[in-house]
Image (cartoon, rainbow, N blue to C red):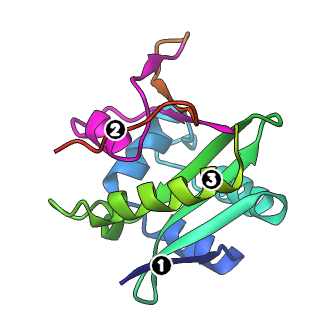
Amino acid sequence: MLRTRTATKADIKRVMKSLSDISSEELRHAGYLDETGHIDLNQPTTMMINAARTDDAVTILNRAEPIAILILQPESSTVHTTMFMATEGFFGEGNWAPTRFLRRYLDVKMKRKPGVTLRSMTFSRHPQLLKWYRLMGYGAPEPRPDGNGNTFTRSPAERRVEPA
């Protein structure tokens, strides 16, 4: 059973210590590497903990197990950006339930914040990336100016139809 709760420091550390391959690759492509070329989790973990203190941060749980952290950060009164990291429990082989759950969660959040647009930047190159974002209600990707990744936008004015 999937549910959310306010993210705690312990939740963030737990998710960051058992990141999915997809989230690990995200950090790699974002440049979070130590001098030996391995992923350095210190800076992104600290960033998420600090953001969770002041922004809207939730842990997505499967039963009692934290499988993802989502943080919505106000960029302006009408735009919120996201920070998201997940374990394999979120992306599980062929299991779209957590993505659909996140879609419903975002639907509720956006109803409570009328007029707010969500902006999510990703460095991922995963072949299912477009399907995940469409399933969560986002529009087409916009390539980042530096060519490293994409930005997805979920506008409150657009009606989204869940893909079959």
Image vertical order of residue 137 relative to residue 63, above or below: above
Question: Quadrant location of the C terminus?
Answer: top left
Number of other residues with Cα within 10 Å of mark 3, as a class: few under 14, some 14 to 19, many 20 or more: few
In the image, taking residue 120 as reference, residue 128 lies left or right, namely: left
Q: Position of residue 4 (x, y in %)?
A: 54, 75
The magenta segment is: 116-144
- Amino acid type, label 1: Arg
Question: Quadrant location of the N terminus?
Answer: bottom left
Q: Secondary structure at mark 2?
A: helix
In the image, taking residue 15 as reference, residue 11 lies left or right, namely: right
- Judge depth for marks 3 and 2 and give the one in front: 3
Residue 130: within the magenta?
Answer: yes
The residue under label 3 is: 111
CA separation in Å, label 1 and label 3: 18 Å
Q: Earlier in the sequence, mark 3 or mark 2?
A: 3
- Amino acid type, label 2: Arg
Q: Give the numbered dot on residue 3.
A: 1
Q: Residue at x 44, y 41 (%)?
A: 26
Q: Secondary structure at mark 3?
A: helix
In the image, taking residue 161 as reference, residue 120 lies left or right, namely: right
The residue under label 2 is: 134
